[in-house]
Image (cartoon, grey):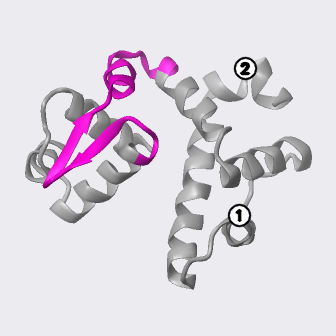
């Protein structure tokens, strides 16, 4: 998630092509596209031919403090099925979800090839772990209350 945030900030600062993103973030072009697509999925950027532009939400996000960004990501993930499954699991079971559980949840929502499900499950668990490692999120009363 840290790399997604870095990419959003760079897009907001004017790195709109994949080549510019790759140069500023020390990513390969393919990885710059991957993280740019993640930013677009979160609503922080929009795809254009050869790159990305910031959305108005992405500009506000990039201007925010680290704590504001973390809270924004947390609330955004609470509105996505697989992530809410993972966060509810953490809340009720008091354990972090693993990739196997995330695979099951993904299969309940989408019909994808196994390799795609595996990659997305790994990303979902990594993003949930990232969020749960942030005290600004886990110490908030709403974080456990749902």
How far from the left and from the top, in percent, is residue 5? 37, 36
How far from the left and from the top, in percent, is residue 7? 28, 41
Which element is circle 2 on? loop
How far from the left and from the top, in percent, is residue 131? 60, 38
Left or right side of 17 for 92: right
User: Going 86% across and 46% down the picture, which residue do you hit?
Assistant: 94
Residue 87, picture quadrant: top right
Question: Sequence order check: which comes first, mark 2 or mark 1?
Answer: 1
**Residue on which disc 1 sits:** 98
**Residue on which disc 2 sits:** 140
User: Going 17% across and 49% down the picture, which residue do you hit?
Assistant: 51
Q: Mark 2 to mark 1: distance in Å?
A: 23 Å
User: Going 15% across and 53% down the picture, which residue do you hit?
Assistant: 49
Q: Residue 99: within the magenta? A: no
- Residue extending farthest to the bottom is 114
Which element is circle 1 on? loop
Which disc number belongs to residue 107? Answer: none
Q: Quadrant of the C terminus?
A: top right
Q: Residue 54: within the magenta? A: yes
How far from the left and from the top, in percent, is residue 112? 56, 77
User: Going 69% across and 65% down the picture, which residue do you hit?
Assistant: 109
- Residue extending farthest to the right is 92
Task: Look at the picture and state if 107 lies above or below 97.
Answer: below
* Magenta stretch in the rendered image: 41-68
């Amino acid at each position: 998630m840290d790399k997604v945030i870095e990419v959003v900030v760079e897009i907001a600062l004017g790195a709109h092509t994949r080549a510019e993103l790759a140069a500023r973030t020390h990513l390969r072009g393919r990885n710059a596209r991957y993280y740019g697509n993640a930013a677009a999925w979160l609503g922080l950027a929009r795809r254009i031919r050869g790159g990305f532009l910031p959305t108005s939400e992405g500009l506000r996000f990039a201007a925010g403090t680290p704590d504001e960004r973390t809270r924004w990501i947390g609330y955004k993930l609470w509105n996505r099925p697989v992530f809410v499954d993972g966060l509810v699991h953490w809340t009720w079971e008091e354990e972090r979800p693993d990739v196997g559980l995330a695979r099951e949840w993904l299969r309940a929502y989408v019909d994808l090839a196994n390799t795609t499900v595996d990659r997305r499950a790994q990303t979902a668990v990594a993003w949930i772990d990232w969020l749960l490692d942030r005290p600004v999120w886990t110490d908030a009363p709403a974080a456990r209350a749902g």
